[in-house]
Amino acid sequence: MKISQRVAGVEYAIRDIALEARKLQRQGREVTYLNIGDPIQYGFQPPENVKEALVKAVREGQNYYAVSEGLPELREEIARKEKRKGLDVTSDDVLVTNGVSEALEMITASIVEPGDEVLIPGPYYPPYASYVRLFGGTPVEFSVDLHNSTPDLEDIRKKITPKTVAICLISPNNPTGAVFSEKSLKDLVDIANEHDLYIICDEIYDQIIFDEKFVGIGKVSGDSPVILLNGFSKVHLMSGWRIGYISFNQSSKLELLRENVPKLARVRIATNLPVQYAALESLKGPQNYVGKFVSDLRRRRDYTIKRLNGMAGLSCSNPKGAFYAFPKIENNRFGSDKEFVLELLKSTGVLAVHGSGFGTQYGSGHFRIVFLPDIPVLEGALDRIEKFMG
């Protein structure tokens, strides 16, 4: 029986590569997983008040279908958060989703038709390309200078065609940790406006910043057609609960999206209601855990980058946010970065993700690891990587 060409082109390297690790485990080998950006799997947990809000909602009977657009109180609180970051948004402009992935799918389904092109930063988080392909479009990577977190504006201008419908931004970036400055964001918004393009901006790591203050797209968006994606998996440590959201800027160019994307929310019924109460508590409750979380990550970042840059045959830019390192393989004795990662796994039991899984144009020749584990775990893994590099 056949399957559609649409689904045949879908890839998710971060989880696909884990299949190889499971084979090793079945043979009795120990594996250190540095592939998935899930803080919970490395010892972090949501604050107690957030856990209690989830349990309380379940016990008090909040177990029915929610309103498709999302719990009204939660949408209000999300709007307040994004307004503080500069986005011109009300609760009516917010849709609660089952993670950012569903938000991205809804938006892509709504703006991409066969033959359309979407600009995405290279390297990129894999679902951005997969969803564009799923709906018949073509993802087009643009260059980013990883050492100073600057998008290549000339490269973007050269790659805009009559088929281009949107520019995607991911800041802080997965897999590189690049964080766009206010000037870079303003330049990108100006280019998008010049060519009448949607601006899709993913800010899920917005508070995981190490070296400078974060600037959100809302601060420079004005009345541009900005679609903001965000969620609770990373900063709020709620990855397994799967909750995110879409926020639409107050732009007249977004009226058709405002009218039609909620139809997709209604078709999929609703987002988990008890989790929405937990998300509400996460926004309204104490935020002191965030500072400790980021401080722990900064120490791990500093240790990991120093170690990687001290290894023969590797070089790594300094991530300014998120929790990923994306080292370049300077002297790859294997045929490709994927072969490098598979050999690293077989030889050392350390699971990384091949860079080409984040886009072949700018990801090839790299690999990605997370620096979420405790430093002793990172030390053991990095010792093995260093030995592997010879």
Image: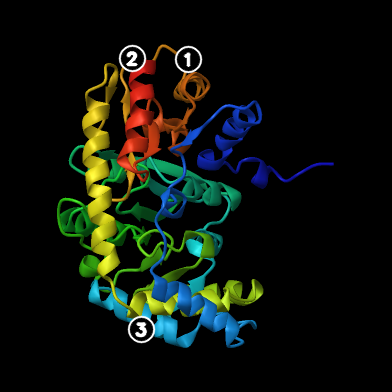
Q: Secondary structure at mark 2?
A: loop
- Distance in Å between CA atoms under marks 2 and 1: 11 Å
Within 10 Å of disc 3 (Cα), the crowding (few <14, some 14-19, many 20+) is some
Q: Amino acid at mark 3?
A: Thr
Q: Quick one: 271 or 278, which is closer to the camera?
A: 278
Pinpoint residue 379: horizontal percent, then vertical percent. Answer: 32, 32
Q: Nearer the viewer, mark 3 or mark 1?
A: 1
Say if mark 2 contacts mark 1, CB within 8 Å: no
Q: Which mark is residue 331?
A: 2
Residue 193 coordinates in the image, percent (x, y):
29, 62
- The residue that label 1 is drawn on is 335
Above or below residue 145? Residue 47 is below
First reached walking from the N terminus: tag 3 or tag 2 = 3
Q: Position of residue 340 (x, y in %)?
A: 45, 21
Q: Earlier in the sequence, mark 3 or mark 1?
A: 3
What residue is rendered at 27% in x and 16% in y? 312
Instruction: Inspect this view and state whether residue 251 appears.
Output: no
336 sits to left or right of 262: left
Q: Residue at x 26, y 31 (%)?
A: 316
In the rendered view, tell whether residue 264 sits above or below residue 351: below
Q: Residues within 10 Å of mark 2 (few under 14, many from 20)?
A: few
Q: Quadrant of the N terminus?
A: top right
Foreground pick, 70 / 369: 369
Numbered disc 3: secondary structure: loop
Residue 207 is situated, as x and y percent measured from the top left of the image, at 27, 61
